[in-house]
Amino acid sequence: MSLQEKYQARETVTDVEKNTPQAQKPKKKFRWRIEDNDSPPQIYNWVLYMTVFVFGIFGAARGLDEGNISGNLAQTSFKHQFGLADKTKTKQQLANLKSNIASMVQLGAIGGAMLAMYTVDKFGRINALRGVCVLWMVAVAIQISASHVGQLYAGRLLEGLAVGQTTTIGPTYLSEVAPKQIRGMCSCIFAGAVYFGISISYFANYGTALHISNTSRAQWAIPLSMKLVMAALILVLSFFFCVESPRWLLMVNRPDDAVAALSKIRKLPSDHPYVVGEISDINEGLLAEKEAVAGNSMFHIIKEFLGLKSNLYRFFVVAAAAQILGQWSGANAITIYAPELFGIVGIKGVETLKMTAILGLVKLISAYLGAFFIIDFLGRRLALYCGITLQLICALYFAIFMTIVPQAANTFSLSGSQKRASQGALAALFLSGTGWTIGFNSVQYLLGSEIFPLNIRSFAQSTVMVLHFANQFGNSKALPLMMLALKANGAFFFFSGVLAVSLFWAWFFVPEVAGRSLESMEEIFNLPWYLIGRKGPELCPDHSEINKIHYNSSGEMSYDIIEKPEADHASFVENAEDDKEEKLMK
């Protein structure tokens, strides 16, 4: 085919799509709320909201630990109890002990994420959640009763087994039950709950530091007990408000239960066209993958996971890269070691705990502002651009401040321009948290739960979370030593470099999947690798059954009949290779 013929074929396909009912619809204006005129209004109901709430606050498990251990490491009673105030130890030994205590949950979470590969598909999303809650409570009880560091390690390692599973169970379930128009928001409720847990722990630590004696173990045990309350609350609520994932029910060959569950979540009759269409989309995806899921054995799952180029791109280029770049951007280091970092900019004593509490609150507010007003409205890519850029500016400012005013860490009072610069560094730590919550923190859970096929979704999400906690473990272990070896400014210059690379990655490799059905992702990732991120959604419109159903303002339903041109992908892909030549012809 000549270049001119290719160009004419491409124009023909474009004209066909322009004449479809979907293409003729007027463009929606941007609003600071969701305007869904294509779905029956009944799908937004309290059954959906309550089940999303229960699985959403499950994200607090990780946040409760990060905020709790951050404050505990600064508590005088905790230091004396577990050897962190031992004057016979060198700075290196104390840094190692501190990093061991802080990172033990991340180490256990690696095993927990691997365990979730089995439990989430074997027992279902709800039963897996309940099992984790029980394990979590046992682990916390071991820590509260600890009198030496060995028992503390054991309890934190066991807690990690629970926390590691939450990051697969929550995002997987939320992506499967949420309507596509608000899937990003629902998944980000889980991500935001991390900072709900952090805020609770930060304020509990600050309160006990103010009102409980430094010699009492209650000073650190009471904040730790907040985890027991949260685990018990989620466990009880799961029996009253949660409905099992219809997608999982279909995967385990329980079609009648799947239709009933979807009907309940959507608040529509089981024979309603919307329910029938959604079930049809799920079944079509499952049938297309029938050979790969035969027997649903782990061998077949791993074979499909590693055997398809589209899955390798999804894992290594999108999901794994999001974890590596996000974890080494410095955000979690700031969360866990916030008191020490506030000390570096001149905040001393119990005021460091006060500042960590404010930091937790800032992250909580920005996380939910991002969930409700950014991730589904502006899209995944633009949210990443905004978040990474803000993080990069803040990390650079902090690094430059510590280079110019290194004495801030050892001086109780700064004067003049140095004091104002230190206030800017304090603001940079807060704003860096805001950038993290609307950028990397939103997509690190969301993308893995959205882009993988149903039959390997929980396996892939678990594998991504193994990488997540492995990186977080390395980050927690490395930061105290990095601060000694590179100084604070060197560590933050390193984080700035990672963030600069992240901006290019987000632009070139990450496709925009906001508003697409889960079953429509496959076409995007079957494109050539250099087109997926920049042009994937444009070249592969969403042709799922759900996307063809529309409702007008009076509640009347219409159905689009869209015939996909046979040459759709081929003509686009062939011409994509000649983009430069075509531009010259134009």
Image (cartoon, rainbow, N blue to C red):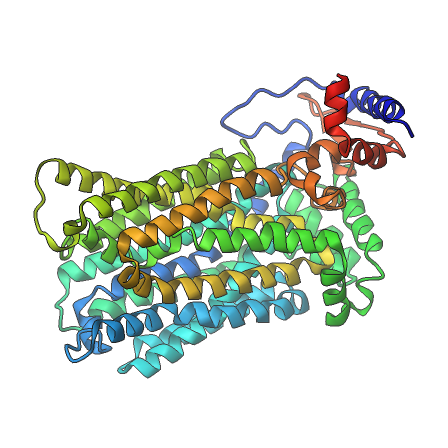
Whether residue 302 sits left or right of residue 415 in the image: it is right
- Quadrant where the C terminus sits is top right
- Residue at 43% across, 71% down: 159
Q: Choose between 271 and 108: the one closer to the eye.
A: 108
Q: Choose between 464 and 241: the one closer to the eye.
A: 464
Residue 365 spot, x, y in % from top left:
37, 41
Residue 520 spot, x, y in % from top left:
74, 42
- Residue at 47% across, 51% down: 326
Whether residue 40 sits left or right of residue 232 in the image: it is right
Residue 67 spot, x, y in % from top left:
33, 58
Please identify the quarter of the rendering in which residue 15 is found: top right
Q: Choose between 109 and 234: the one closer to the eye.
A: 109
- Residue at 79% across, 36% down: 573
- Quadrant where the N terminus sits is top right
- Residue at 20% across, 53% down: 344
Q: Is residue 284 above or below residue 507?
A: below
Whether residue 235 sits left or right of residue 96 in the image: it is right
Total labels: the figure holds 0
Work out which residue is located at the far right of the displayed protein and give it.
Answer: 1
Residue 97 visible in the shown view: yes
Q: Is residue 103 above or below residue 422?
A: below
Q: Choose between 548 and 109: the one closer to the eye.
A: 109
Residue 195 visible in the shown view: no
Whether residue 409 sits left or right of residue 173 in the image: it is left
Please identify the quarter of the rendering in which residue 101 is found: bottom left
